[in-house]
Amino acid sequence: MSTDSLQPVLALDWPAVVEFSVVWLCTFAALEFLGRSRGAGVVKGVLFVGVVLVLVVGVSDNFSRELARLHVLLTGLLSVVAIVGVAVFLPEIRQALVRVGESTLEAIDPSARRRPHADIGAAVAEASITLARQHIGAIIVIERGTSLEALAQGGVTVDAALSPRLLESIFWPSTPLHDLAVIIRDGRIAAANVELPMPPTGAVPPALGSRHRAAVGVTLDTDALVVVVSEQTGTVRLAERGHLSDPLAREDVQRVLTRQLEADANPLTSTAARAREAEVAGHA
């Protein structure tokens, strides 16, 4: 290849290309993250106001003498919008930083994220089956890669060893913490009485109530695995990645739950079908 053919490439302003690429990638990553967060509804509004203010400030800067007061006012308003934007997305920013820290820790020490999946599955399954027999509703959220600390902070901190009896007592009617959800983190009950975000209308069949909607809602933005027990029907379902399984046979709950925990973020699209296949294979 001749030097003349390389002239257009060599003539490029490479520092500017690198800067533009970095800014574009960072902006895309931020929009992608915020677009999947619970604050996604205000992303467009904040961006619109911010872009308008930047354009107006840029125009007023050219007439800084004639529009001195307006320029100062708009510059201050732009700073306020930036601060408000940070405040609005503070939980999401905190969650992103936690995820970066967890990824770094896992890269350094892969065993740091190992959890006793079988133990968790056995304890949660036993409690769920007992509650289902008594027709006592429950939502048990099992944290995986995505931190649920922002949600847990809105509930009551428990930080106790996981056991079927403790889970059952938490959800028993008339107890102070029986309402809302429980979060399990690293084999421990991290928090109870946790309010979960609701999904958009239509994400869950209308025949199912708010408990199932909340179970699906928390899985839209996280990789959590949720066990939901119906108070009306006494059935047990799993929710993951925005999908809600069919009711599970009680003898299949522990096996399916443990399998999903070990899969660690495989979409839950046919849990009931996999359970039936496993049952058929067992009989064969």
Image (tube, rainbow, N blue to C red):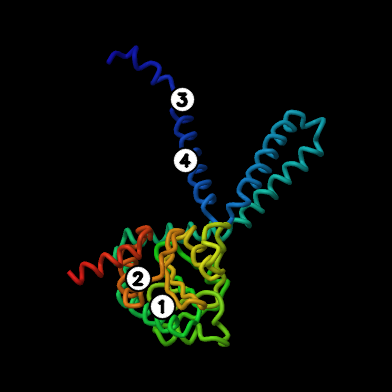
Q: Which type of secondary structure does the marked residue at label 4 adopt?
A: helix
Nearer the camera: disc 2 or disc 4: 2
Identify the mark nearer the N-term, 3 or 1.
Answer: 3
Where does the image place residue 167, in percent across and percent down from the top left? 45, 83
Query: Disc 4 marks which amino acid?
Result: Leu
Evaluate if marks 3 and 1 touch, with contact meaning CB atoms under 8 Å apart.
no
- Mark 2–mark 4 Cα distance, whole angstroms, equals 37 Å
Q: Earlier in the sequence, mark 3 or mark 4?
A: 3
Disc number at residue 118? none
- Residue drawn at the location 34% of the way across and 67% of the way down: 261
Which residue is drawn at the image coordinates 46% and 59% (left, top)?
Answer: 242
Q: CA distance from mark 1 to mark 4?
A: 37 Å
> Marks 4 and 1: in contact by CB < 8 Å?
no
| In contact (CB < 8 Å): disc 3 and disc 4 | no
Residue topped by disc 4: 25
Q: Is residue 10 left or right of residue 137?
A: left
Q: Earlier in the sequence, mark 2 or mark 3?
A: 3
Residue closer to the observer: 244 or 180: 244
Q: Is residue 193 left or right of residue 112?
A: right
> Badge 2 is on which residue?
257
Q: Name the quarter where the N terminus is drawn.
A: top left
Q: Is residue 279 above or below residue 7?
A: below
Depth check: give the residue in front, 224 or 189.
224
Q: Residue 270 is drawn in which quadrant? A: bottom left
Q: Amino acid at mark 2?
A: Leu
Give the mark nearer the N terminus: 1 vs 4: 4
